[in-house]
Image (cartoon, rainbow, N blue to C red):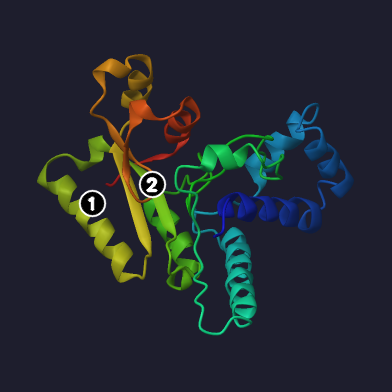
Amino acid sequence: MGEAVANAIDAMAAVKKMVFDDRSVAMDELMAALAADWEGHETLRSRLIARAPKFANDDGYADEIGVEMMDFFVEKTRLHAARYPGIIFPCSVGTFSWYAMIGKEVGATPDGRHHGEVIASNFSPVCGTDVSGPTSAINSYLKMRVADMATGAPLDLRLSSNSLTGEAGTQRLAGLIKAFVDMGGNMLTLTVTDVEELKQAMKEPEKYRHLRVRMGGWSAYFVMLSEEQQLHHIKRVEHGLG
């Protein structure tokens, strides 16, 4: 099971672009910044976040790195599985609800993430990086070998409830899901809400006991999540369907 895949793609894209292609960042400088958890290197961190390509934007630069990474993952899994005839070793990408806990065990990464911060959930974008819309996020995801992820590779997205009102909104949502399936998508989880509602639920949980969000395979009551998990949902890009 692959974890923090989007962070890994974004991190490698940042290193390739800034260190090797543009030569605007020295590897020693980057390594020192990571060792210091970016303390004293905030300008460098901001540059990496702003200038490096990101997964889930239908950006060929970042997506090609992801394709190579996932090809390696699948083929190496099959190579080791061949040693055990009769036993199936299916691949997957997933974190379930553990992305906050997993993040505590991962040091600072070249995508600008601090030590201990949550990682990207499942096969989803790093929070705040999928700025080109839900179609672009899905296009990037579908370039990966998700057909070989027999035990799941959920893509978690948050959609604005304002863009899905009425029959027209329902049809737009149905069209997005149908296109995802027709194009070979593996698993899509959608949370339909808006950021202000989530923020208000954190302030007045007793008034929002009904509010649910998707956790990559199931729904959870938002007010029952940890603060880290709640903030993770709030930081996700809110996509509209026009």
Question: Relative to residue 142, is residue 161 drawn left or right?
Answer: left
- Secondary structure at badge 1 equals helix
The residue that appears at 12% across and 41% down in the rendered structure is 166
Residue denoted by label 2: 157
Question: Relative to residue 218, is residue 26 drawn left or right?
Answer: right
The residue that appears at 54% across and 58% down in the rendered structure is 59
In depth, the one of 71 and 82 nearer the eye is: 82
Q: Position of residue 171 (x, y in %)?
A: 16, 53
How far apart are the two marked residues, 2 and 1, measured between alpha carbons?
A: 12 Å
Q: Position of residue 52 (x, y in %)?
A: 66, 48
Total count of labels:
2
- N-term mark: 2 or 1: 2
Position of residue 177 relative to residue 35, above or below, is below
Position of residue 196 relative to residue 116, above or below, is above
In depth, the one of 155 and 104 nearer the eye is: 104
Position of residue 130 relative to residue 199, above or below, is below
The residue that appears at 28% across and 16% down in the rendered structure is 206
The residue that appears at 49% across and 76% down in the rendered structure is 88
Question: Relative to residue 32, is residue 207 drawn left or right?
Answer: left
**Disc ID at residue 173:** 1
Q: Position of residue 188 (x, y in %)?
A: 35, 55
Circle 1: residue type: Leu
